[in-house]
Image (cartoon, grey):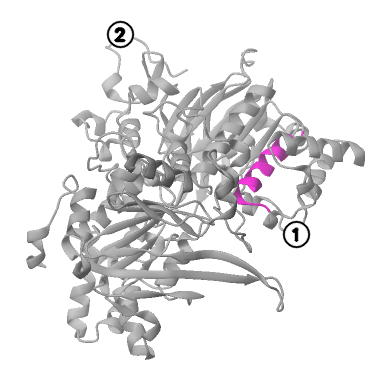
Amino acid sequence: MSERNGSERTVSQRNGTEQNAGSHIGNELLRTENLTRHFRIGGGFSRTNLHAVDEVNLTINRREIVALVGESGSGKSTIARLLAQVYKPTSGEIRFEGKPLSALRGRKGQLAYRGDVPMVFQDPFASLNPAYRVSHGIMRGLKLHRTELSAAQRAQEAERVVEAVGLNPAAEILQRYPYELSGGQRQRIGFAQALAYRPKLILADEPVSMLDVSIRIGLLNVMADLRETEGVSFLYITHDIASARYVCDRVMVMYGGHIVEAGPTEDVLHEPKHPYTQLLLSAVPDPRAPLSVDVDTAKAEPPKVINPPAGCRFRDRCPLAEQICHEVTPKLAELAPAHEAACHVAQRAAAGVAG
Amino acid sequence: MLEPMNPDHLLEVRDLWVEYATPTGPVPAVAGVDLTLAPGEFLGVVGESGCGKSTMLFGIAQLLNPPASVTAGEVWFKGENLVALTAKSLNALRWRDFSVVMQSAMNALNPVHTIGRQFKDAIKAHAKRSDTEIRVRSAEVLELVGIDPVHLKSYPHQLSGGMRQRAMIAMALLFTPDLIVMDEPTSALDVVAQRSLMMQIKELQRQLGFAVIFVTHDMSLVSHFSDRLMVMYAGQVVELGATRGVFDAPAHPYSKGLLEAFPSIHGEKKRLTGIPGAPPNLGKPPSGCRFHPRCPVAMERCASDEPGLYRVGTAQARCLLHEPAALSVEVES
C-alpha cells in the first residue's frame, strides 16, 4: 500500500485536466467496445427487442472514479450487470486489463475476474443474508477469492476491511447480525465485502440511493478514501449528479441506452453540451439556486427503446430537435478536450466555432 | 376540557404522542408534536429515517396499526378531533376531506386491477355515484395530473414510475379534499421525474387550493415548494419556520447539519462530513437535548437540561442556544 502514497491526491487537487493528462494506455483498466445488450420481450417468436444498452464505448482507468448518470430505465444498471458478467453482451466486447472477457474460460478465470471486479448493490437491506453474522459474507469471499490466506490471516483481513470502511470496533461488528446495523452501516459492510477480494474495480450500483441524505456523504467519503488507500477504481452508478460531482473524476451521462455525454466532471457540469445533460442539471434540487422552471412536466417521460428507429433517442423531449435528429443517430464526438457529446446541434455549434 | 379549534386553521395537532408497544416497553416515536396548518398551506416535514416523521403522518391520518397507537394528544381537523372519532365517522372524512399518498406507488396500487377499477373502488367506498359519473370523474382527475385517460384501462405495471405516482395523486384528488398528506411520494423517482412531479403538485395546489403535508428525508427537495418547514429529530419538532428562513439561517444545529449534508452542483467543491453518529434509540432517548451526542456545538448543560421550543425570530427551535433570558416565557404553543 505504501508505494501508492506517492501518487495520492486530495479531493481538491483532483480535476479534469489533470486526470486527462494522466490517462494513457498503461493506465487503462477496463474498456468496452460497442457493448450492446438487447432483451427480447414478448412470446417465443417475438421479434420485439428492448435495446437496453446500444454500442457503448467506455473506459475506466486505474484509481479513477467514474460516474454513470442517467434516469431509471436508461440502461446504467444493465451496463453494471454486463461488466459484472451477470448478463452476456448481445454484441461487443469488454476488455479488462487488455484481455477480452469473451476469451475468459473456465471457473478459475471467471472467479479471478469476479474477484477483480465485484459489485456493491443498491439495497443494503436485501443484499445481506439476515440469517448470518456479518463475518459470514466477508469470510466466504476471502475463502473463495484469496485461497492463499490461512484461517488466522482471513480473520485478520476481515477486521482490516471492516475498519477500512470506517466501522469500529471491527471485531464486534463482524459478530453482529445485519438487523443490528443501520442502513449506512450495512452498506459499508457491502463495500467491505467487495474490498475483501482485493478488487481493482468496484461496480457500485446506486450504493447510496436507499440511504438517508445525512449519511450518504459518509459512504461517498468511503469511496474516495478507498481509492486513495487501496488504489481501487469505481464505477459509480447514480441518478444524482450532485453526488457524482462530489467524488468522481469523470462523468458519463446515459440516455435511452446510449452514452450521450462524457467528460471530466467539472467540464460536464459547467458546460453541458447535450440537451439531456442540461435538463438533468436543471432538475437537481438546490436550495442555494433559484428555481429553474424550464422542466416541461408533460415531456418528463422516459424514451421508448423497444425496436427504436434510427435517430436521436432524446429528440421527442429535446427543445433543439431538428429534422436530422429524426433520421440519423448521433455519435459521440469530442467537442472540447476529453469532453464528448452525441448531439447533432451541439456538434454543429462546436464545428462552427472551430471553423 | 377540550378547546375548540381556531376557525382559521384547517388542522391543529396538539401534543401528539404515538407509541409503539414492544416487549421491552412502549417506545415513543412521536413525542409531543404541536402543529397547525392553514387552508391551502404547504408544509414540508424533514428528518432522517426513524425520526418519527412518517409515524406522525400516520398518527394524523389515523392510519396507525398495532403495535403503534396514539397514546395522547388531539388531532383537530375541520372542527373534529380525529383521535376520538369512530371508524365509521372517520370513513366519512377519508378521501372526501383528506387523503393520503403513500411512498411507493408500486406497492400502493393493486397490480391485478386496472387504474380505472381502483379509482372506482375508492369512489364507491365513499359515495354513491353512477358508473357514468365515476368514469367522467376518473378521466378528469387523470387529465389533471397530465396522464391520458386511456390509461384508466391500463394496469399499474404498464405505467412508468412517474406515471404511477401521478396516478396515486390523481386518486387522492377524486373528491377534491382539503388536505393531502404525502409520505415521500417522489423518493422512488429520478431527479427529472421528481422535479416534474413537484411542479405538478404545486400547480394542482394552486388550482384546487388543498393543503399539503409533505414528508421527505431530502430537505433540498421541498426548498422551492413548501411554505413552512418542520424539522423532526427523535420524535420531536426541533425547528419550525418559514422554508426560506430555515434554509437561509437554520436555527437548530441539526437543521444546519442536514442542510450541509448533501453536495451541491454549484460552488466550490469541499469535503463534507454529513452528521456524525446515528439517530438515537427512541426507547431510551438521550438525557437533556436529544441531539446532544451528535451535536457539534453541544454545551455541558445540553446533556442534562431538556430544551423547550423557543422562539427565534418568526421560527421556533428546540435548542438551548436560543433559550430566552430567565424571565421570558416559553412558546410551547
Quarter of the image containing the N terminus of chain A?
bottom left
Q: Tell me the kind of residue under disc 2.
A: Leu
List x then y, in percent, for residue B112: 75, 59
- Horizontal and vertical percent position of residue A147: 24, 86
Residue A129, placed above or below residue A209: below
- Considering the image in quadrants, where does the C terminus of chain A appear? top left
Q: What amino acid type should be assigned to the residue bearing mark 1?
A: Val
**Res. B262 in view:** no
> For residue A230: magenta?
no
Residue B63 found in image quarter: top right
Give the residue drawn at x 52%, y 54%.
Answer: A72
Quick one: which residue is furthest to the bottom in this view?
Answer: A106
Vertical placement of A322 versus A201: above or below?
Answer: above
Percent x, y of residue A291: 46, 27
Q: Out of A315 and B314, give the one closest to the viewer.
A: A315
Q: Chain of mark 2?
A: B
> Taking B65 as reference, is B311 left or right?
left
- What residue is disc 1 on? B112
Considering depth in this image, is A27 or B82 the residue closer to the camera?
A27
Spatial CA distance of label 2 from label 1 is 63 Å
Identify the residue at image location x=63%, y=45%: B165
Q: Seen in the image, is B171 located left or right of residue A142?
A: right
| Residue B161 sits inside the magenta stretch | yes
Q: Would residue A204 be visible to someone looking at this image?
A: yes
Q: Which residue lies most toward the front here?
A: A355
Name the main secondary structure of what is drawn in magenta: helix
Pointer 1 indicates a residue of which chain? B
Residue topped by disc 2: B327
In the rendered view, tell whether residue A238 sits above or below residue A55: above
Residues in magenta, as a range: B159-174
Query: Dot 1 lies on which element?
Result: loop
